[in-house]
Image: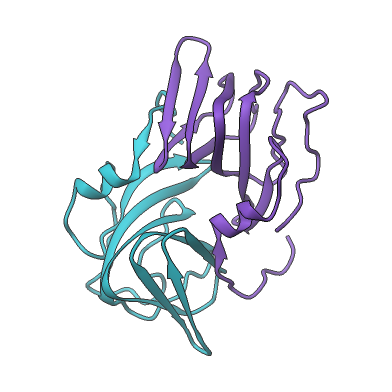
Chain colours: A purple, B cyan
Amino acid sequence: MSEPDAPRVVSLEGSLAAFEGLWQPRIVGELNGQHVKVAKLRGEFVWHRHVDADELFLVLRGVLRIELRERALTLRAGEMVIIPRGVEHRPVADEEVHVLLFEPAGTLNTGDAGGPRTVREPERL
Amino acid sequence: MSEPDAPRVVSLEGSLAAFEGLWQPRIVGELNGQHVKVAKLRGEFVWHRHVDADELFLVLRGVLRIELRERALTLRAGEMVIIPRGVEHRPVADEEVHVLLFEPAGTLNTGDAGGPRTVREPERL
């Protein structure tokens, strides 16, 4: 693990304003082997699961639907959900959504599904 | 580790509305051995550090000052900071502040300082 940086205040809104790409999470913090990321989502993502990682979604702006195999969850700003490891899910957003993600460092956005939308090394902001 | 619950949507504002106590974090989620907590802060807390835990503060409402030994950080709603393990800090809030915390399960609010303000087993919401 690298040496931690000196504590710095991070604006989530400012971080989200610093990039454009959809479905391309950016790392805004690291602690205890976990990454804090922000992402902009719109449209349908791929079905996937994370075999070894629980994943937290906290919606900062907009409305996010997370489809599970048996039902769907709807999250609005200020709402969060934890998708346990192994649970298949698919994020969907009719309009652009801004989210904060919390998951182990190295977790791939596409989980076990892989494919062209995989971001192997998210940028750090 | 206990079996994860089925995914459920958690409203941070709703969670904060469900209790009154200051400096008494409530657990609203658990993932990868980490706890997600919410807390209401007002006044001055004790100086402390967490020997084995990095700690994230995300301000949801109000203004939080985190005093370090050499300087102080000011966080407003939508801003976060990670206090690395071992770094002494003291949260201070002139008016009531609502925060979200990420830290390893079992992290004590008073860290190495202990004392009467220690919450040994935070309630789960």
Q: Say which of B74 and B108 sits in front.
A: B74
- Asked whether, in this view, residue B30 is left or right of residue A90, the answer is left
The residue that appears at 70% across and 28% down in the rendered structure is: A111
The residue that appears at 33% across and 79% down in the rendered structure is: B46
Where residue B75 appears, as percent x and y from the top left, is 45, 70
The residue that appears at 71% across and 28% down in the rendered structure is: A110
Where residue B108 appears, as percent x and y from the top left, is 37, 62
Where residue B26 appears, as percent x and y from the top left, is 29, 51
Where residue A56 appears, as percent x and y from the top left, is 52, 38
- Residue B53 seen by the camera: no
- Look at the image and tell me in which quarter the N terminus of chain A lies: bottom right
Q: Say which of A117 and A53 sits in front.
A: A117
Q: Residue furthest bottom?
A: B70
The residue that appears at 38% across and 28% down in the rendered structure is: B8
In this rendering, the answer to whether A96 lies above or below B55 is: above
Q: Say which of A114 and A123 sits in front.
A: A123
- Look at the image and tell me in which quarter the C terminus of chain A lies: bottom right
Q: Residue furthest left?
A: B20
Circle count: 0
- Residue B84 seen by the camera: yes
